[in-house]
Image (spheres, helix red, strand yellow):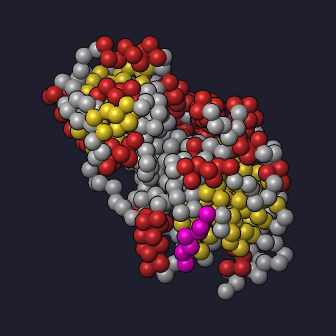
Amino acid sequence: MLTIDFLGAAGTVTGSKYSITYGHRHLLVDCGMFQGEPELVERNRESWPFPARDYDALLLTHAHIDHSGAIPKFVADGFDGPILCTEPTIELCELLLPDSAKIMRLEGDPLFSEEHAQQALQLMEGCRYYKQYEVFPGVGVTFLDAGHILGSAWLELEFDPLPEWPEQRPIRVVFSGDLGRGLSPLLAPPDRPDRADFLILESTYGGRLHSRVSATSQLREAVERVQRRRSTLVIPAFAVQRSQDIAYLFESLGVGNISLYVDSPMAARAIRVFERYPDYLSQKAGQLLNEYDQLLRYPHLRVCETSDQSRAILNFRPPRVIVSASGMAEGGRVLHHLRHHLPDARSLILLAGYQCEGTRGWQLQCGDPYLDIDGRSVPVRAEVESLDGLSGHADYAEITDWLSELERPPLATFLVHGDEESLQAQQHRLSRWGWRVEVPEHRQRFELMARSRD
Ligand SMILES: [Zn+2]
């Protein structure tokens, strides 16, 4: 028996979570939190298809909360096996998981405690790219570079044949995790798979192409605009990866001496994680880091870790650039900057990543004239644009490239991590190639080896 249960990111973009049963043993791939709409968040309390303590291992593609955020819940429910992931993923989880527990406690609706988050971190075992690790007898996993965030991986799982399988050969199952675009200034482009019997493929941008304008030129143009107006550019950005990408790009922009503030304690700590892993960066970024011992070398950069440093930003006159979390403006210090700058028509807001439906970032993207912040209705007079070039997710043309080295089509491809429109577009495209494509429903189970028989 080789079955897969789609426990998350099925028909939606959050909650990535797949339960695999091999013979009588169970393993989980990713254990993400559902985010966004209340009926999705409700799914965070659903039961596991098998008791959590019966799982032998958990494999984690990367540290983002929609892939890792429910791990402490899994641990609270009884899981105590090894969690295999890359070394930077462990360090980023050390920042993200306790923080997520704290936010839930403050919001009064905790799924797990800070102790459970600490227990989960204790179970993590660091793996390197390109080396096969035994998950348990009969199952191996290799982590390959997904180029999405620091330490992100796609997974190659190799299952030895079980006696009842019709074909006595190993079966390879590939989980794409989240795939980067190959354009991050800090990361190497994603490695590509050469063989997959079954493929679980992300489809965040399954129906769309990113603009081909480079992030560098878009960012330079935005900075020049606020320089001319002597105003403020606010970039809501994820504290991990996007904030570092942006700050790293500034050195090469040639925009004079405009002040750049990275205002996020999490981003500040994440910079130090990046600096410990030159081997996980793009060749150029890794070389520069080894040479200068410092990742971000723009001379007018101020990283604001304390709240005093954060408050001081407004004491300095514009023009200025403020990069602050959270990336979808759902919380964090960026709210304070938005409240201050949205009513000013000279300000520019640059949204720097995927904006989930229902979030403040999404409302801004849609052109809402008012934004609710801390119970106050703030008028949106500032210009709002999207910085497309730094998206962490490959678009459909980039996914096509990623698939281009496969020797032959997989026996079946399962599309996950996309909204309905993206999933359908991707299904349509792959079906035209003659591929067998499934769009799993939430909690749908598939028997993989039954598929290869017909
Ligand atoms: Zn991700």
Quadrant of residue 97 in the image? top right
Tell me residue 278's x, y (percent). 52, 34
Give yes or no for residue 269 being in the magenta stretch: no
Identify the residue shown where x is 39% and y is 64%.
207
Identify the residue shown where x is 61% and y is 47%.
33
Q: Judge by depth and name the residue closer to the eye, 362 or 157.
A: 362
Quadrant of residue 125 in the image? top right
Give yes or no for residue 438 being in the magenta stretch: yes
Identify the residue shown where x is 48% and y is 20%.
305
Residue 143 appearing in the image: no
Quadrant position of the N terminus in the picture = bottom right
Quadrant of residue 198 in the image? bottom right
Residue 309 appearing in the image: yes
Quadrant position of the C terminus in the picture = bottom right
Identify the residue shown where x is 42% and y is 15%.
309
Image: magenta residue range? 436-442
